[in-house]
Image (tube, grey):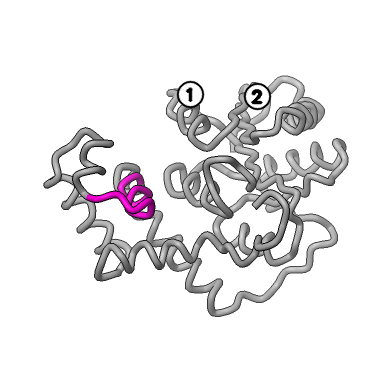
Amino acid sequence: MTAVNDRARFLIIDDHPLFREALHSAVQMAYPDVDTVEARSITEAFELLADAKPFDLALLDLSMPDVHGFDGLLQLRTRYPRLPVVIVSGHEEPKIISEALSYGAAGFIPKSARKSDLAAAIRSVMEGAIYVPETYEGQPPDANSTDRAEMVQRLAKLTPQQLRVLQMLRQGLLNKQIAYELQVGETTVKAHVSEILRKLNVYSRTQAVIEVSKLDSAELFRGQAGF
């Protein structure tokens, strides 16, 4: 991981201004000299990540306006597998923490943590550790968790363009609509769909949507504020 004195860059992804400010303050407490950039959505985050200068750490809220559940984490892990992503969330249930870690999060920091604890957690991750709250007790993976972890590994094989096509398939768009959105020919879209099915080891676009939708883990958040 980048040494702090090499002018590391942190990306804060949260749609709440007050908490972006709180995270920024915690980052400054941990590392006064780092560059901190803020994004209000996953879409804005990807625009910033397209910058030639890379980021060393992303701090991500699960409750975002343009994603559901673990979608934001999955998109970041798939498109930027080398970028450590730490979840900072108000949802602190052990099951949610376990799922986040199984999807490749570099840590999980509760939003209820004090600023000094946030700063200590950030330092811990920058030093190479996987941070979890002291009260967290790891849960053994069940069959569903194992299946989801395998699907995450398959998703990691998709190119950024294939991932975009998959997201549009989940929105119910037809090939011609996807072609229009991406400004490519329908033949190109069909080729992308074929590769998506092959890489995900499924036989139809409907099956692909169903299998990937399971990663939303909506049952984990059902009935909770913010989801």
Crowding at dot 1, Cα within 10 Å, few <14 / some 14-19 / many 20+, comes out as few
Residue at point 31% right, 65% down?
Answer: 206
Crowding at dot 2, Cα within 10 Å, few <14 / some 14-19 / many 20+, comes out as some
Residue at point 84% right, 46% down?
Answer: 112
Task: State left or right for residue 166 relative to residue 217.
Answer: left
Residue 105: assigned label: none
Residue 12 occupies quadrant: top right
Q: Amino acid at mark 1?
A: Lys
111 w.r.t. 213: above or below: above
View extreme (left): residue: 187
The segment highlighted magenta reads 164-174
Residue 126 occupies quadrant: top right
Magenta portion: prevailing SS class: helix
Task: State left or right for residue 171 relative to residue 219.
Answer: left
Residue at point 25% right, 43% down?
Answer: 178
Counting from the top left corner in percent of width and height, residue 133 is at: 80, 55
19 w.r.t. 101: above or below: above
Residue 53: assigned label: 1
Residue 152 occupies quadrant: bottom left
Q: Amino acid at mark 2?
A: Thr
Per the image, label 1 sits on a secondary structure element best described as loop
Counting from the top left corner in percent of width and height, residue 169 is at: 32, 53
Counting from the top left corner in percent of width and height, residue 200 is at: 33, 64
Task: Specify whether residue 165 is painted magenta.
Answer: yes
Q: Which residue is mark 2?
A: 36
Per the image, label 2 sits on a secondary structure element best described as strand
Label 2 and label 1: CA atoms lie apart by 13 Å
Task: Specify whether residue 84 is painted magenta.
Answer: no
In the image, 98 versus 186, the foreground residue is 186
In the image, 106 versus 97, the foreground residue is 97
View extreme (bottom): residue: 143
Which of discs 2 and 1 lies nearer the camera? The answer is: 2
